[in-house]
Amino acid sequence: MPKTSLFAWLLAGAFSVGAVLAQPADPAYPQHREELRARIAELSQSASQAEVLEAMQQLRELAQAAGDTDTVNLMDIRRIYMTHEDASIDASLDAMHAVRARVTDSASLEVREMLARAYGNMYFDAGNFHSALRHQLQALALERDLPPDPLVAQLYRLGTIADLYIAMGLPQEALDSVARAEALGGASMQHDNRMQLLTTKAMALRQIGRLEVAAHTLDAAEALVAGSGSALNRIRLEAARAAMLLSQAQPARALESIAAMDAYAEANDSAYFRLRAQLLRGHALIELGQAERGLPLMEQANAGFLERGQMVELLDGLSRQAEALEDSGDPVGALAATRRLQALRETLFRSEHARAIAELEAAGKASELAHRADTLSTENRLQDAQLRSERLARWLAIGFALAALATVVCLFLAIRRTRRERDRLAFAVRRDPLTGALSRYQFDQHVGPLPPSGDTAATACVLLDLDHFKDVNDHHGHAAGDAVLQAVVERMQRLLGNAGELYRWGGEEFLLVLRGNSTETIEARLQMLVDSLESRPVPWGETSIQVTVSGGAVFHPFAGDPDAPFADAVRWADTALYHAKHEGRRRIEVIDVTEGGELAVRGKRPTDLRELLTWRRMDWIRLRRLGDDAGVRT
C-alpha cells in the first residue's frame, strides 16, 4: 500500500496553496484507491491483460486527480513492465527512464521497489547482466520492509538473483543466493518458492560439474512438482532435466525430457519453451552424431531468440552450439559459432553502456551532483564573504577608517577559514576517511587516464578483495571490520613505499598500481604483500582475525598497446578477480596475452567472466596463479 495518505497529500500541497484551494482533496479517495487496487489484484489472477490494464488506468486517473504521485508512478511502472516486449526493449527502457526521472528519494517504498524490480527484470531480458544484478539487489534490500508479506517477495527475488548469476557464469554466487533463501524461508517456505530454488540450485551445480548432486536435487524438485506443480514449473523442470542429461553425455535420455517439455509447451502455448526445446533437441542430435539434423534446429532456435529479443537465451544458444560442434569434431563450425557469440557480446556491451548512461541521466547522477554541490557551497561562502566586505567598505568609505580596518581584518579571517575548509574538503576527496588509502575519486582524476610514466619498465594493475569479509562483520561486529581494513591498508602502504599507489576501490576491495624495473620485480613485491597480510592475523580483543585475499592482476600497457587507457587494465584485473573467486578464493590470478592473441584482444576488455574464459579457450590469453610459471607475456 502506498504511504501517501490524505494528510501527507495536504501537507505536500501546502507549497501550492492556490492549487489546494482550487481543488480540495476528496475525503473518500483512500477508500476508492484501495477498492480499485483490490480489483486489480483479483483481475490479475484470471482476467485478460487488457482488462487489468483498463483497471490500472482507472486507478491512475483517480490518483492523478487526487495528487497522489506515488500511485500514478506505480501504475506507469507496472504498465510499462506488463506491456514490454523483448524485441523492442529499448523503447520500453526509454519509457521507464521517463518515469524514473519523476521518482525522488522520498517516493514510497512500494514505488522504489517496483521500479528496481522492473529495471532488474527488463535488463536481464536484454542481456545487460551487471545492471540487472544491481537493480535486483536493490529490490531485495527494499523488500525486507515491504508489506504485506516480505518473506515471499525476498525468496522470489533471491531465486531470480541466483538465475542471474547462472546466466553470468557465476555458479558459486548462485549457490550462495539459494542457501541464503533456504535459510530465510526455513520449513515454512511456500511450495512454489522451494520448487524454484531447487531447480536453480541444480542448474548451478551442473555448471560447476557436480552432476550427481545436481541430479539428486532435480529429483527432489520433481517430487514437489508431482505433488502440486504448476504447468510453468513442470516445463522449467523438464528443461533443466534435459540440460542435465546433456551434461552427463546422455543425449538419448535427454530427448525424452525434451519431448515432455515440448508437449507441455504446446499445451500451454509457450513460444519461448518451444524454442528452448528446439535448441536442446538440436544439441542432443549433434551429440548423437546427427549434426545434419541437429545443427539446423539450433540455428532456427537461435534465430527465433534473436527475433524475439531474448538475448540471454541467444547467448546460451550460441555457446551451446559452439560446444556441441566442438564435441562432435567440427572445429571450423565451433569457431564460427564462437565468433558469433563474441560479436553478440560486444554489441550487448555497447548497448549496456548506452542504457546505463540513459538511466544515470534520468536519476540525476546523485553522487556527482552532491560533489558539485559541496564545491559550489564552498565557492558561494567565499563569494558571500567578499560581497559583504565590499558593501561594508562602501559604507565605511564615507569616513569610518577605523571600522574599515576592522572590516579588512574580518575579511582576512573569513578567507583564511574558507581556505582551511577548502583544504579539508580537498583532503577528504583525495583520501578514504576510514583507512587513509587514496580514494577512487583521486584515481579517476590523476591516475586512471594516464599511462605509466618516468623510466619505469613495467606497471601492474591489481584488484584485491578480502575473502569472506562479511563474516568478520557478522561474527565480530563492524568495529572489528573497520580495524581489519585499517590494518590491511597500513601494512600494504608500509610495504609499498614509493613503488606504487593504494586505492580503496569500494567496501573491502582495493586497487594497487605497482611499478618496477621488471615484471618479475613487481610480482615478487605483490607476493610479499599477500604473504604479509595472510601471515599476520589482525588482533581484536582477546582473539585475532585471519585475513586472506583474492585478486586479479594484469600488466599495462596491455597487449603491447601504448595508447590503451588505464581503465582497460582495471577492467581486465576485475575480471581476473572474478576468476580467482570462482576458483575458490585465496589466490591472485594473472592474465597474460599469448603471442597469437596480442592483435585479437588489443583495444578490447572482457564484459564478464564467461567471455574471459572464451578468450582463454581460443588461446588469446592465459590465466595463471601468482607464483606459478609466468607462461606467455607480451
Image (cartoon, helix red, strand yellow):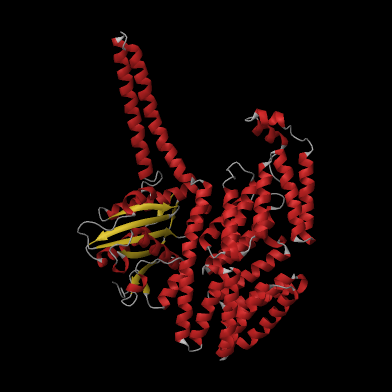
Direction from residue 226 to residue 620 in the image, left or right: left
Q: Is residue 352 visible?
A: yes
Q: Position of residue 114 (x, y in %)?
A: 64, 52
Q: Nearer the viewer, residue 15 or 242?
A: 15
Direction from residue 101 to residue 606 in the image, left or right: left
Q: Quadrant of the C terminus?
A: bottom left
State which quadrant residue 397 falls in. Answer: top left
Q: Nearer the viewer, residue 262 or 556?
A: 262
Q: Residue furthest top?
A: 399
Residue at the image position 80 percent from the left and 47 percent from the top? 35
Direction from residue 18 to residue 401 in the image, left or right: left
Residue at the image position 59 percent from the left and 60 percent from the top? 122
Q: Nearer the viewer, residue 355 or 527?
A: 355
Residue at the image position 54 percent from the left and 79 percent from the top? 320
Q: Position of residue 175 (x, y in %)?
A: 57, 67
Q: Is residue 162 visible?
A: no
Query: Up-down: is 90 above or below 63?
Result: below
